[in-house]
Image: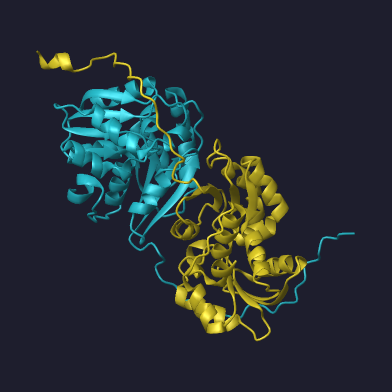
Amino acid sequence: MAPDDARPIKPWPASKQRAPKFDEGRHHRASIGFVLLAMEQTVESDMMRHAPDGVGVHFARAPMANRVSVETLAAMESGIGYAAGRILPDKALDVACYACTSGSVVIGEDNVFAQLNRGAPGAKPTSLITGVMRALEALGARRIVVATPYLDEVNVIEANYMEAKGFDILDIQGLKIADDADMVRVTPDYLLNYGAEVDQPEADAIFISCGALRSVEIIDALEERTGKPVVTSNQAMLWDCLRLAGVNDRMDGLGRLFREF
Amino acid sequence: MAAVPETVHRWAPSKPRSARLDKGRHTRGRLGFVLLNSEETADDDIRNIVPDDVGVFYTRVPLADPVTVANLAAVGDDLATASALLPPEMDAIAYVCTSGSIAFGEGPVAEALAEPQPQAKTTSLVSCVVEAMHVLGMKRIVVGTPYLDEVNHMEADFLVGHGFDVLDIQGLELMTGREMCYVTPEQIVEFAVEIDRPDADGIFMSCSALRTVEVVEEIEQRTGKPVVGSNHALIWRMMRLAGIEDRMEGLGRLYREH
């Protein structure tokens, strides 16, 4: 038998009939889609590290300039639907979330939700600021101190937005960092001290704002130091998305919010 | 009457502070991945394998079903735009679609991805597969895929063009990217073992949607031959392009020895 007899030549042979065997997939509990800012560098690792097994977390990016100002944030509204439409379009995501705290404030939750549902019609829409406010409500916190990396122009908008929703913002302080590439470099130790510094005796809770900050790493330490519940952007976002998707696991290492609610 | 709340400026300005900065979480490298819209296997595979101090960043491009050669080729036009949406200063960027990188072409994919990020090393999934098979010394190969035969035949011609002797290529003939993510790892093992033949010196299981990385080691043990999977080759090659030379266990010969 010549070796060539064993070798298919063009045209290639047809595949044999095989019945595909499917299971419920890796993400049988829920699938969550996150719309990220183009330059986002912290959300993906936070979500992938902390999402429980069986929950899929998937990402797409929306266009935005690297300089975070009110103008550039508003300009990204239409990009939200564009990006949401690219995450598992034929699966029907359980939840679609816009993963930018200040962006969801400037654009407004209703506008963000409409854009998310334009791209992902079957998904429950949410946004980072929505998750933060739900987390604060679950913790029974009304009087809040806020630490951010932002410019004061962004802080004022965020504080006003939260006050209009019924929170009492005792103080809001920013690091006045305009560039997202620098926000991701703020050390967790610095954030721990910063959070403790903005705390006040009359505050019910401390909120560290911004998905770019590595604040999930210091939640337990800051709660221990201040005796108050701590909410951070990515912690609240993951909690909100999981609960919206019906995933109610209690988890350690991410503060009272995940342990108790 | 619900009035739009007026912007109130009653908060004191922020105190001057100089935040302490370090090099960030991702001190060893930054990898960008352009995924298909239906992809839900590669993003997990990548984060599970790549060490925590290497950043992985994702963005997505739309592929229309059914997964035909024409629809695969059409994705190419979106690659430069998608690459521009990744964070700056990527060390390496890859297009995560095996058959799509053949349909659009390895060179055009690499060029499109590099257009907005000229400092990055850019590649396509199939280029990573070719590199992996070369270092493993695979030449006479059998190929298992989830694809339609028109896609299989394009892939077989491509591999022959790169000097491989394709002894057989077999597809599950699935029409959609979503279905491809739901093929059981057990079936991937059975499929690979079934298409293996005595004269093959390696097995390639094609497609980033298949959960092949979970079973590479098992197929190697069952067949005694080196096995390459799409994401398996992609992640290995992307780490090496960024200078990450870690050897790893549980992912077959490629990660243990090369």
Residue furthest bottom in the image:
A201
Q: How is the image coloured?
A: by chain
- Determine whether A28 is above or below B142 in the image: below
Look at 77% across and 71% down and name the residue there: B8
User: As rendered, which of B159 and B66 lies closer to the eye?
Assistant: B66
Q: Is residue A117 above or below residue A216?
A: above
Task: Name the residue located 19 percent from the left edge and 18 percent from the top edge.
Answer: A7
Q: Quadrant of the C terminus of chain A?
A: bottom right
Quarter where residue B39 is shown? top left
Picture coordinates of residue B20 (x, y %)? 46, 76
Question: Viewed as shown, does residue B73 lie left or right of A170?
Answer: left
Say which chain is yellow. Answer: A
Could you tell me if residue A69 is visible in this image?
no
Instruction: Judge whether residue B108 can be spotted in this image.
Output: yes
- At a point 41% along the width and 43% down the height, the residue shown is B41
Q: Furthest residue to the left? A: A1
Q: Nearer the viewer, residue B96 or B196?
A: B196
Chain B colour is: cyan
Q: Is residue B239 left or right of residue B73?
A: left
Residue A36 image offset from top left, x and y in percent: 54, 52
Pick the residue in front: B166 or B112. Answer: B166
